[in-house]
Amino acid sequence: MKTLSCFLFALGSFLVTEVLADSCADPSQAVPVYRDFNDQIGDHFYTTNNTEYTLANAGGYFAEGARFRVFSTQVPSTEHLLRLWNGGAGDHFFTLDTTEATNAVSSTGGYVLENLAPMFVYSSQICGTVPLLRYWSAGNSDHFYTISTTEVDNMPGYSFERIEGYVLPLVGSSSSATDGSAAGTGTPGSPAATTSPPAKTNAAVPMPVGHLYFLLPLALAVAYL
Ligand SMILES: *[C@@H]1O[C@H](CO)[C@@H](O)[C@H](O)[C@H]1NC(C)=O
């Protein structure tokens, strides 16, 4: 009986490994996300479209280089990182939360949904990803995203809001603590904002359903003991 339990446990573990492996896309399919900064309107802008990036540079933005990687089409386990733009505030805003996006485009929100250069990211830390940290500066009306845990140290007025999703580091770097500023200036160059943004709670990161499969071999083993 014990042998059978062990066998079933091993079988279950094997299946779990397969299920989890299947839920990861080939990381080599991920594409770089380029970051631009406009110090006149205080806006950080992110795009996978190199042409759009280059055009923005001609239109008042400074090129800050590739920062992390995402998928440009929906691959297993990823979700659409929605892109919104507020022309009045001069702010590009990215969120996985459709309710938050809906509120942002409401009459009081002032944002429009932009369906350009779609980005798909994981909503939990799987498949070799690192957290995409989201910050907000009320003074600049600017959402800022980075995988560096230290970059914002040089950016007065920016406060951490939450982990927006999980992205892949650039090829050749593997740590979320790596400061990507080597790829660009990374300097906001805008007046320091002293206003604190309204406190926002960190979004609970849902546990991926895939993890529940871990219960399967346990249940089988117990049933046959
Ligand atoms: C990239 O951006 C340019 C300039 O905005 C646009 O003309 C082009 O259609 C975009 N390419 C894709 C694949 O979205």
Image (cartoon, grey):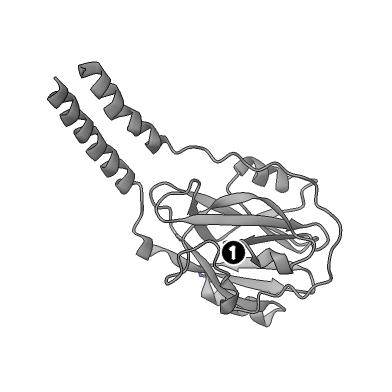
Residue 105 seen by the camera: no
**Residue 45: x and y, percent?**
65, 67
Residue in the foreground of this view, choosing between 92 and 55: 92
**Residue furthest out toward the front:** 2
Q: Which residue is mark 1?
A: 148
Residue at image coords 27%, 19%? 222
Label 1: which secondary element: loop
**Residue 37: x and y, percent?**
69, 72
**Left or right side of 205 for 18:** left
Residue in the foreground of this view, choosing between 174 and 67: 174
**Residue 9: x and y, percent?**
22, 30
Residue 194 figure quarter: bottom right
Q: Is residue 184 above or below residue 119?
A: below
Residue at image coords 72%, 79%? 60
**Left or right side of 132 for 197:** right
**Residue furthest out toward the bottom:** 58
